[in-house]
Every structure is written in C-alpha cells, then in structure tokens.
Image: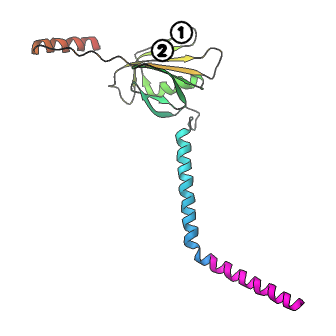
Amino acid sequence: MGDKYRLRVLWLELLVTAAAVSGCRGDRAEQQRRMLQTEDRARARAERLEKVREFGPKGELLPSDLKLGGIVMPRGFEMKFTDPHDWTYDGNFPQVLVEEYFDRRLTHASAVKTELGELEFRGVREKSDPNMPAVRLRITPTPGRLDWTRIYIAEPAPMPQQVVADDAAARALMAERHRNAR
C-alpha cells in the first residue's frame, strides 16, 4: 500500500505541475489585461485624489473650479451666504494661507486691514484677466479660531439699460459712462 500511495501522490504532483505550467503560458494575455486594468484604476484614483487635494507641494492653497465674480476660489471653502452679486464662503484654513493665495492671483487698487484682522481689497482683478470688472474682496478671521477664515466677494450690480433717443444722446451717455469708469 505504501508504493501505491506514493505512486498516486507522484501522479497528482505531476498533474498539478503540468496544469500550472500550461496555465502560466495561456494566461499571459489575461495577466497583461489585469495589469492594464490595475494601472487604469490607479490612474483614475490618483485623478480623484488630485481633484480633492486642498494643498500644493509647498503647503499653498490650490485653486478650485469655482469662479465667483471673476475670481477663482481656493479649494475647500463652503458656501455660507449668497445673493445675486455677493458671496460668502467659509473654510477651515488660517487667514495667512488665504491671503497668500489671493496675493499670488490678484491685483487690487487698495487694501485696508482693520484692528480685528479683517483685510478688505477694493478694485480686485485676476492677474490672468486684467480686463474683468473690478470686485471687492474681504478676508475675515473667525473670532477665537486661528484656523477658520471667511471670504466675502461682491461684484458691481449690472447697470440698468437706458433708452437712447438719438446718436448725440448715445455719445453723451457713453462719454459719461467712460468718465465714471475711471
């Protein structure tokens, strides 16, 4: 019985080895397909993570896809209040980081900082779009918290349409608008 048992075990080992060898040869295409599928999944995951990442490699805030009044908002801010031409967003970030983000991206006509730490910019435009209508931007710290900042953006309301009777009135109206725009 010992020899029969050894012969059976040897026969089974031979069958398993032959199946494994033939399976390895036939599965190359399947293995390559699985590897490519894994690479696609890893790439899709990296893209999803990149979209939700809030900080760059140097610790700076990253821009989001949201543009309010012509200004690109940083990632990670949530809407608190909104009106047709005013937006208020809150974010769990220190005010210094938010100020640095906007300093890199914006130009402004004037800036005023209050005693409470509120920073207000007037005549704000994106550096990438200097011809956009100027807006007002206010960056406010939350009292008692160093890691929470509020952003307020206000754009000018559209001017009501005026009916012009003739060419002379149209030229006068355009000249007045041009004077007021400065």
- Reply yes or no: does residue 173 show up in magenta: no
Q: Which SS does the magenta portion mostly show?
A: helix
* Residue 55: image location, x then y, percent: 57, 35
Which mark sits nearer the N-terminus, 2 or 1? Answer: 1
Query: Could you say which quadrant of the image residue 108 lies in?
Result: top left
Label 1 amino acid?
A: Thr
Question: Range of the magenta residues?
Answer: 1-23
Which of 166/7 is in front?
Answer: 7
**Do callouts 2 and 1 mark residues in contact (Cβ within 8 Å)?**
yes
Q: Secondary structure at mark 2?
A: strand
Q: Residue at x 57, y 38 (%)?
A: 57
Crowd band around label 1 with a 10 angstrom C-alpha radius: few (<14), some (14–19), many (20+)? few
Q: Secondary structure at mark 1?
A: loop
State the residue position of label 2.
120
Q: In 3D space, how far apart are the residues under numbered discs 2 and 1 (Cα atoms)?
A: 8 Å
* Residue 32: image location, x then y, percent: 55, 67
Tell me the quarter of the image containing the N terminus: bottom right
Crowd band around label 2 with a 10 angstrom C-alpha radius: few (<14), some (14–19), many (20+)? many
State the residue position of label 1.
114
Label 2 amino acid?
A: Glu
Q: Residue at x 36, y 29 (%)?
A: 129
